Structure formats: structure tokens, C-alpha cells
């Protein structure tokens, strides 16, 4: 990933009450960001925790973060992980999630991160920030490990049933994200399908294939599921139903590999002995497969920076999600996606005349 500019100040609002593991893990993740991230990353960054003030102050003190650039914005309510998004936002105006979104809407914060209710996070983000012209609904863009550099997969669950035009625009946003945030010069864009032939898949997928084939993107065609982890594309486009299922399956690979290795080492003394020599390689492999290393996934298509972290995020994952929020802001990804959409809309209008 390219180095972000060091001079830009970034204020991140962090929903400290969201997620499955409680506010202690989130607060610890914020402290770890300043304790463990390189100076070049944390320079100019400050974090605002949103949630119950007394609870967060106690947790921050316990984590040793009193002297760090971390402040607290009180919020008296919490959106549960199983609550209906629209009802939760309507009934809980002082929730930590909405208070966080309000900080970016007002210009106090530049980015926001939450491991809380994904549907509520998306609804609050759209309400507070609005979408870029040409984008109907934002898409969650996550990173998946490959044999080389990570691939961008979108959508990961924000839009379960997509129209061809939405998927087409997801491809444009994903290409900009891969190029400007991950530093891929000419991202290879692929359409996830059940076969590589243009005639395969649903009518929607076939329509998107045709549009992408005629676009200026570096479209490499359809991609079957086994090509993702092989690194055959830098950006993989699919609807949110397929993307979310694929994401959860990929996350289980880490547990499978780690569990299998542990059992093999327990079974034979020679395996335990060999592990001592292979430990650096195993650690490197584990880092590549561990989804916590990628931290969070941005919602692409918003007039701002909204990072969705996994509900079960550890403090390590929260730390990395905060870095995603910093990088997304400093690379100007929002402005570049807006510019890309404006060019696309202009071309579409010109072709209609």
C-alpha cells in the first residue's frame, strides 16, 4: 500500500459501543493504534470515542491511554447487533453510532469506524454523508488474501439484490480504490461468475459483462470462485449476497489451516521439532490469511469515509480498521471516486445525444 501523506490531520470517530466483544476491546484497539502503528501512520491522527462517557473513561485509563490523542463524545444509547437498522436509528437518536456519524457530518471528524450493526452503519452513513452523484447505494469493499497482493471484493453485503447498473458502478469504484489506496497501477477487474464464458450466469451478470467489455476499465472477463485466492484479478465484482457468503467462507479458511497445523504438531514429536524451523514461514502465512490484518472494509460511494469493521473484531482488528480510515482519507479516495463517476456520467450523457 502506498505511503499516505504525512502532513494531513485526520480525526477519526470510533463507535466504541458497537460489536460483539464490548467497548473494552474497541478502546484497547484505539490505544494499540498509537502504541503499535508506525510514526508515519499515526502522525496527525486523533480519535474520538463515542459511547457512555464514564465507562469509556474508565476503560481508557485501564488501557493506559489517558495521555494519547483520544477523546470521548458521550452517547447514551447503543444499537444492538440484531436490531433492525431503520428502527434502531429512529428510536435511538443518541446512539454511539449516530453520534459518531454526526461528528463527520458536522465536519469535526474526517473518518468513522464501527464494528457494530452493519445495516445500521450503512443507513447512518447514507443519512449523514449522502452518496456521490451517480451512485444509488454504496458498496462494502473488502480485501481478500491471495498468493500475491490482496484482491478487492465488492459488494460484501450492503446490496443483496443488485441491478446491472449498480454492479457496473461498483467496478469503477473498486478500480479507483485498488489504484489509489492499494497502489495497483492498472487494476484487473473481473466479474464473479459460474464460468468464464460471456454467456454464463444470470441475465444481470451477462448484462454487466457486456457493459464492462465496452468500458475503459482493465476488464479481464468472468472469474470463477477458485481464481480469487489465486490472485487472478485485483478487483472482483459481485452482488452483496454472493460477496458476503464468499467472505465468511474465506474467513473460515484461516481457522481450518491453523487448526490443521496445530493438530499435526500435536500428533508427532517430529512435527513439533520441524515447526521450530518453519515458524517464521508459518507466521508469515498466518498474517496473510488472518482477516484481522485487513481490519475494516470501506463503504464506497459516500461523500465521506465510513469503515465497517467485523462484529467480532479483536483489538488488533480495530487497530487496523483505524489505519484503513486514515489511509482512505489521506489518499483522497472519496474525491477520486467522485471524479471517476463524473467522467462516467458525462460519457453516458454524450453517448445518448
Image (cartoon, rainbow, N blue to C red):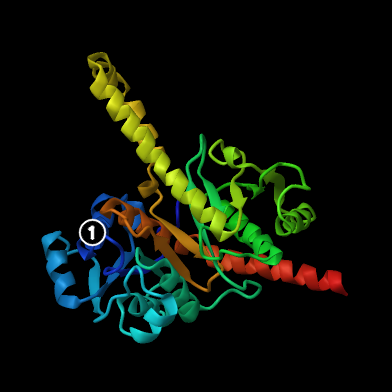
Out of 10 and 236, give the one closest to the viewer: 236
The residue at the far right in this view is 353
Q: Percent x, y for residue 229?
A: 53, 39
Badge 1 crowding class, 10 Å Cα cut-off, few under 14, some 14 to 19, many 20 or more, is many
* Number of numbered discs: 1
Residue positioned most to the top:
270
Residue 6 drawn at (x, y percent): 40, 58
- Residue in the picture at 26% in, 50% down: 36
Residue 95 at least partly seen: yes
Give how far across and how far down residue 170 sits, in percent: 62, 61
Q: Nearer the viewer, residue 88 or 174?
A: 88
Give the quarter of the image for residue 164. bottom right
Residue 64, position as x, y percentages in the image: 13, 59
Quadrant assignment for the C terminus: bottom right
The residue positioned 38% from the left and 53% from the top of the image is: 295
Residue under label 1, please give it: 25
**In this picture, residue 219 sits left or right of residue 232:** right
Amino acid at each position: 500500500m502506498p505511503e499516505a501523506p504525512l502532513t494531513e490531520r485526520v480525526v477519526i470517530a470510533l463507535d466504541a459501543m458497537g460489536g460483539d466483544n464490548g467497548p473494552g476491546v474497541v478502546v484497547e484497539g484505539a490505544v494499540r493504534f498509537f502504541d503499535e502503528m508506525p510514526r508515519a501512520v499515526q502522525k496527525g491522527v486523533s480519535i474520538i470515542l463515542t459511547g457512555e462517557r464514564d465507562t469509556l473513561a474508565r476503560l481508557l485509563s485501564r488501557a493506559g491511554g489517558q495521555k494519547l490523542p483520544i477523546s470521548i463524545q458521550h452517547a447514551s444509547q447503543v444499537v444492538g447487533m440484531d436490531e433492525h437498522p431503520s428502527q434502531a436509528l429512529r428510536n435511538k437518536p443518541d446512539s454511539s453510532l449516530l453520534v459518531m456519524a454526526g461528528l463527520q457530518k458536522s465536519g469535526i471528524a474526517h473518518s468513522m469506524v464501527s464494528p457494530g450493526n452493519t445495516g445500521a452503519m450503512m443507513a447512518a452513513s447514507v443519512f449523514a454523508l449522502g452518496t456521490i452523484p451517480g451512485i444509488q447505494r454504496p458498496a462494502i469493499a473488502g480485501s481478500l488474501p491471495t498468493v500475491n497482493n490482496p484482491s478487492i471484493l465488492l459488494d460484501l453485503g450492503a446490496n443483496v439484490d443488485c441491478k446491472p447498473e449498480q454492479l457496473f458502478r461498483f467496478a469503477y469504484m473498486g478500480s479507483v480504490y485498488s489504484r489509489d489506496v492499494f497502489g495497483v497501477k492498472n487494476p484487473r477487474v473481473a466479474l464473479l461468475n459460474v464460468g468464464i464464458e460471456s454467456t454464463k450466469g444470470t441475465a444481470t451478470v451477462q448484462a454487466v459483462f457486456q457493459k464492462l467489455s465496452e468500458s475503459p476499465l482493465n476488464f479481464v472477463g468472468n472469474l470463477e470462485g477458485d481464481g480469487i485466492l489465486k490472485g487472478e484479478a485485483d478487483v472482483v465484482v459481485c452482488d452483496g449476497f454472493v460477496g458476503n457468503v464468499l467472505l465468511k467462507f474465506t474467513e473460515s479458511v484461516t481457522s481450518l489451516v491453523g487448526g490443521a497445523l496445530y493438530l499435526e504438531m500435536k500428533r508427532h514429536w517430529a512435527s513439533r521439532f520441524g515447526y521450530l524451523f518453519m515458524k517464521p514461514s508459518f507466521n508469515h502465512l498466518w498474517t496473510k490469511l488472518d482477516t484481522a490484518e485487513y481490519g475494516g472494509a470501506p463503504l464506497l460511494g459516500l461523500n465521506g469515509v465510513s469503515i465497517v469493521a467485523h462484529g467480532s473484531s479483536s483489538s488488533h482488528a480495530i487497530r487496523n480498521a483505524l489505519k484503513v480510515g486514515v489511509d482512505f482519507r489521506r489518499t483522497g479516495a472519496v474525491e477520486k471516486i467522485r471524479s471517476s463517476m463524473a467522467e462516467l456520467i458525462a460519457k453516458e450523457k454524450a453517448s445518448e445525444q
